[in-house]
Image: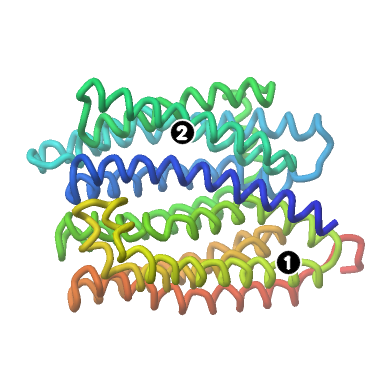
Amino acid sequence: MRRQILRRLSWGVADQAVSSLENFLLGVYVARTLGAASLGALGVAFVAYGIVLNVSRALSTDALMVRFSDVPRPTWRQGVAASSGVALLVGLAGGVGCVAIGAVLRSAMPGSEVGAAFIALAAGLPGLTLQDSWRQAFFAAGEGAKAFVNDSVWTVLLLGALLAGGVAGAHGVAWSLLAFGGSATLSALFGVVQAGIVPRLRAATGWLRRHRDLGPRFLVENVVLASVGQVRAVVVAATVGLVAVGAIRGGEMLVGPVSALLMGLAQVAVPEAARAVRRSDRHLRRFCLGLSGGLAVVSFAWSLVVLVVFPFGLGRVLLGTVWPQAQVLVLGITVRNLAGCLQVGPSAGLRALGRADRTMRCQLANAPLAIVFCAAGALAWGAQGAVWGSALAAILGTGIWWQQLTSALRQHVPEGSAA
């Protein structure tokens, strides 16, 4: 049993490592060829991408992960066809919204790349959300290897597009995002072949109706979570400048391996937690503690590598002229990541219990903390203050998550027990 769990978790980590490599390659390409201001524009666009992706997951694959893990194959196929249809529709709607935002930003900020970045992102959003839905579907079925192959295909295509663009003289954030979204769309089509399932747009309404007890709450939770990053980026840009946003983005790229591990395990954690809760509450609690503890240890180890090794030249090799500005932010970012690792366990546990009400409560409590502390820090201490304010908010938020999981376990009545 433990070997099977480790194998599935390992595929989650491997897949997220490849997925994060895509973002890392794109960030390095922009940082080295365009500079901090362009990296900041990319960071703002990526927050918008994160919001759309989180909306897609909330309405489509979050319920799939909770209710379609370890189910008969025909049941899984029906669920995937409907949930992928929802994901595709969300991507289309998000693309329309990004075009509108991009047009407004181009008029309001004629000298900035941010508006063009939003419009370029819009073109690839349907493919990006659909590709992500295949990943979640494969993990729900315990087939992480297929998710890994799909993301590997995307990475190779993206790398080829960036290299081809460099040779052809295509530069700028807009081109980079077009390459990002276009390669994801091709990978999403490959996912259709892998799964042998075509997204059913007509089934989207039925899917939303059947899972209305989870979808709206996950939607609020995910949008709040993604919006916090957007608001923080805007706060930093308004108080310190777009260059500071780029510097923070550069620092986040340096701790990317920890973020990859965190997100990789997080996407597999919910199906594994759902399997654990079917055994007993004790197994679920042990799984959540082990998950958070293991992530925290790895986060601490990588932080030491970044803080001790990267100043001897590797940081400048990766980030170029952005490195000096990013270096001073690394410690605060790693503390924030460490607190985030400790939140993964209770988040997975609450979702496995179907307590979307409590996960939503956690996000609604943590969001104001993150924004207020970031804003106060930015006003008092610039980019450094923004990073450390976010870290302090994450530490306080960890306590909220664990308190909610403890309370939910006290109320939980296992299947088959008398109410």
Can you see residue 330? yes
Q: Quadrant of residue 282?
A: bottom right
Q: How is the image coloured?
A: rainbow
Q: Is residue 73 left or right of residue 238?
A: right
Q: Nearer the viewer, residue 183 or 411?
A: 183
User: Residue at the location (50% across, 72% down)?
Assistant: 300
**How many numbered marks, from 0 up?**
2
Q: Which is nearer the N-term, disc 2 or disc 1?
A: 2
Local packing at callout 2 (Cα closer than 10 Å; few below 14, some 14-19, many 20+) is: many
Question: Which residue is outermost to the front?
Answer: 312
Q: Which residue is mark 1?
A: 287
Q: Nearer the viewer, residue 295 or 77?
A: 295
Q: Quadrant of residue 236?
A: bottom left
Q: Which residue is mark 2?
A: 128
Could you say where residue 409 lies in the image, as x and y percent from the top left?
Answer: 73, 73
Q: Nearer the viewer, residue 63 or 18?
A: 18
Report, in whole angstroms, how far the alpha carbon at label 2 lies from the one at label 1. Answer: 31 Å
Location of the C terminus by quadrant is bottom right
User: Residue at the location (60% across, 51% down)?
Assistant: 13
Query: In the rendered structure, which amino acid carries the disc numbered 2?
Result: Leu
Find numbered disc 2 in the image and state the secondary structure of the residue it sits on. Answer: helix
Can you see residue 96? no
Could you say where residue 200 lies in the image, as x and y percent from the top left?
Answer: 61, 23
